[in-house]
Amino acid sequence: MTNRLAAVALLAASSLSAQQPRFAGRDYVIKNFKFESGESLPALRMHYISMGQPRRDAGGVVRNAVMVLHGTTGSSANFTTRTFAGVLFGPGQLLDTSKYFVIIPDNVGHGQSSKPSDGLRAHFPHYTYDDMVDAQHALLTQGLGVNHLRLVMGTSMGCMHAWVWGERYPDFVDGLVPLACAPTQIAGRNRMMRTMIMDFIRQSPDYDGGDYATQPVGLRPAMGMLFVLTSAPKVQQRTAPTRDAADSSIRAYLDNAVRTHDANDVVYAFDASRNYDPSAKLGSITAHVLAINSADDFVNPPELGIVEQLMPRVKHGRFVLLPITEQTRGHGTHSLPAVWQGYLAELLKTLP
């Protein structure tokens, strides 16, 4: 009986796996990439995942390319899950890869793309969001031959990148889906917590100017601050309903975070947002925009009303504030398309 059950379970898992999109990672190297700071790299590696094939119109313009952008300290792997890829990229789904050409990069400083922990440490160029978007553009145009995007969809940091795309390359993209951010400079509590994350690391006595031999002790409280920044009370109450469960859960999270993150990479990733502020040029965006936030997002609390104030400046813009439900996960709702895909379906129908 045990063997038969194991065989059935293996067959079911194999069948489910066969239905999921397959993810092949590749690298493209951008030669002599120049950063806003004046620094440069002779070779900037951009790692990416792609699914599907580009389709061109009679004029040679790619019409089915979609780029998906991850958040701070994340990578393309964030979108290979059953709850994201399994909802959007499969047969008959909204971004079915038999119809769309989906590109998911590891952004500068993240994942398997060039980053401080590769060896330069604190001598790595001090990149900004504009640099990151320019590197994405180079990957598309030089590396993949993509001269137009149907959609740019991004979560958290990737959400802010989507706004930068709308202003920096206004004729390149038809639609923007910024998930979990605001189109203005990072200030108030959001900036304060980011500053604490960077200060915990850089002011750690064993940081050694970024040339540490082992991860500095300040990385642990920094990752604790990141947890608070991206947490949602109802979610943590459900997952850790007792004192002991809460203690065990947060300690396990921090243990794993310290094992899987590099202090310089974290500092650079948060510092990259220092000059982000698309608010002054929102009127220049010609793409159709669907901005989505969640009411339980600690990073972008709805009581500030920031997006509501700015959205009228966007010619073809719509803002959706998702109410708190049993399905929302605070800031992390950005990576649960099952919650918001109905709005995405409506946007896709309106794109020119």
Image (cartoon, rainbow, N blue to C red):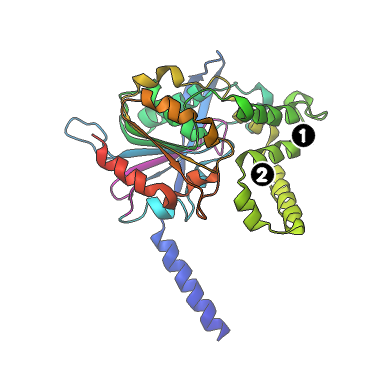
Quadrant (top left/top right/bottom left/bottom right) for the C terminus: top left
Secondary element under disc 2, as helix, strand or loop, is helix
Q: Report the side of 77 relative to 197 (left or right).
A: left
Residue toward you, 174 or 191: 191
* Circles 2, 1 touching at the beta carbon (< 8 Å): no
For image coordinates 23% across by 36% down, the residue present is 56
The correct choice, above or below, for 236 with respect to 306 in the image is below
The segment highlighted magenta reads 93-113
**Identity of the amino acid at label 2?**
Thr
Q: Position of residue 334 (x, y in %)?
A: 49, 43
How many numbered badges does the structure rendering display?
2
Q: Residue 103: within the magenta?
A: yes
Q: Report the side of 231 relative to 175 (left or right).
A: right
Q: Residue furthest front?
A: 303
Residue carrying label 2: 260
Residue carrying label 1: 218
Residue 221 appears anywhere in the view: yes
Disc 2 crowd rating (10 Å Cα; few below 14, some 14-19, many 20+) is few
Quadrant (top left/top right/bottom left/bottom right) for the N terminus: bottom right
For image coordinates 32% across by 46% down, the residue present is 345
Q: Residue 25: within the magenta?
A: no
